[in-house]
Amino acid sequence: MKILQKKIIIVGVGPAGVGAALTLSRQGFRDIVILDRFDRVGGIPGKYTRHGKPTFILWSKAQIRHGSEYADSLSEQLNRTGIDIRLGTTVIRFHPEEREIEAVSKQDGFFRIRADAILFACGARESTAVERGWMFGQRPARVFHTFHLLQLLNEIPEMPQARVAIVGSEVVAYSTAAKLAQTLNRPLMIDHGKTPDCSVLSRFYFFRGQTPQRIQNVQKAYTRGDMSVEGIRLEKKPAVSIPADYLYLCGNFVPNTELLATADIPFHTKTRQLTTDSEIQLRQQGIFIAGNMIGKASGGEKAYFRGVFSGRRIAAYLK
Ligand SMILES: Cc1cc2nc3c(=O)[nH]c(=O)nc-3n(C[C@H](O)[C@H](O)[C@H](O)COP(=O)(O)OP(=O)(O)OC[C@H]3O[C@@H](n4cnc5c(N)ncnc54)[C@H](O)[C@@H]3O)c2cc1C
């Protein structure tokens, strides 16, 4: 099979992948291919439609935008560069020694590409109740992630009145609470930690004064309900039982490092983050990671700037 050769491969066309691609293009690199399994540019922001409350904060403009607006602006900038963008393309395997990836798409079938540098900007997903380590009990229906809420809101923009509990306190948990607060009275947030992970400023953007109810410092929580979720029991003295028709597990990201795992690259089994040593070794081989695949959860624009930073690193490596 013919193996394509490129200067740079970028896997993932979310804010981080686009940030890197634009930076490399501005530095004069043209021979770039960017691959993404989604059908549009923009990663997670592209999954947000234009209804309800916008939840993407553009700090550089001091504005708050709908995810899809932000994704559109990334797409327009990327299209102007003329970079080879292959959407609907899933990267399934990775060979670090050869700097080669294997990918599949409806259009091109199975193919391989080698490059002088590869950037993985595959994002992250929200952790499950088990992965959180402090949530126990059965797994009844109506326990969702933010992604499910987006799909639900796309179909039914006005959520029926229901009792909703949100688990988490990161930027995504607060943005979820803000979306839900449009139709529900002050959604309840439950968190393991003492202070919210979401910054004061982001919380201000989402709520401007009318903050959601919050129960913090929960050491253990148990879901209640056999078929569908009926509530959540918090282990405190005395135990508190909160009724809920829906439970959303928000934020608390797990990086999408599965692809790197196929190449036996060591990472922390609990956090799924690459170890510092393995990240440095990869970089020396021309392999980089960016955006929500590394570090703590962040909003879209921060992921973009992490991509810019990686783009500069790749340029320096290639020069
Ligand atoms: C469910 C959810 C909701 C969020 N809501 C908000 C919000 O309301 N406000 C806010 O500010 N931030 C929000 N965030 C955070 C924000 O979306 C991220 O910070 C930002 O999108 C991260 O950018 P990224 O480029 O690192 O990853 P992503 O945007 O996740 O992009 C990663 C891209 O990689 C692609 N990819 C992954 N694996 C492969 C593969 N094997 N082959 C090909 N392509 C692949 C994916 O299709 C995706 O397009 C949310 C995050 C999540 C997960």
Image (cartoon, rainbow, N blue to C red):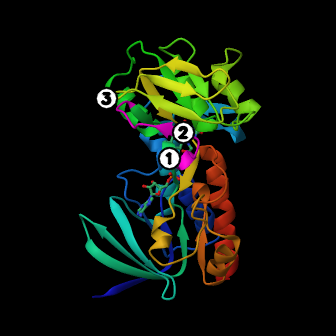
Q: CA distance from mark 1 to mark 3?
A: 18 Å
What is the spatial separation of the Cα atoms under label 3 and label 2, in whole angstroms? 18 Å
* Mark carried by residue 135: 2
Q: Residue at x 63, y 19 (%)?
A: 212
Badge 3 amino acid:
Met
Q: Secondary structure at mark 3?
A: loop
Type of the residue with mark 2: Met
Relative to the observer, which residue lies in front, 111 or 185?
Answer: 185
Q: Which picture quadrant has residue 314? A: bottom right
Q: Residue at left 43%, top 25%?
A: 246
Amino acid at circle 1? Val
On residue 227, the disc is 3
Q: Is residue 169 magenta?
A: no
Q: Is residue 51 visible?
A: no
Locate the C terminus by quadrant. Answer: bottom right
Q: Which residues are magenta?
A: 131-142
Mark 3: few/some/many CA within 10 Å (<14, 14-19, 20+) = few
Element type at mark 1:
helix
Looking at the image, tell me whether mark 1 or mark 2 is earlier in sequence order: 1
On whether residue 139 falls in the magenta region, the answer is yes
Query: Is residue 208 shown to the viewer in this render?
Result: yes
Examine the rendered structure and indicate whether residue 123 appears above or below residue 47.
below
Residue nearest the observer in this picture, 151 or 169? 169
Q: Which residue is mark 1?
A: 130
Contact flag, marks 1 and 2 (Cβ < 8 Å): yes
The answer to whether residue 201 is left or right of residue 79 is right
Residue 229 location, x and y as percent? 40, 26
Vertical arrangement, residue 109 with respect to residue 207, above or below? below
- What percent of the width, then of the height, locates residue 139? 39, 37
Dot 3 or dot 2: first in sequence order is 2
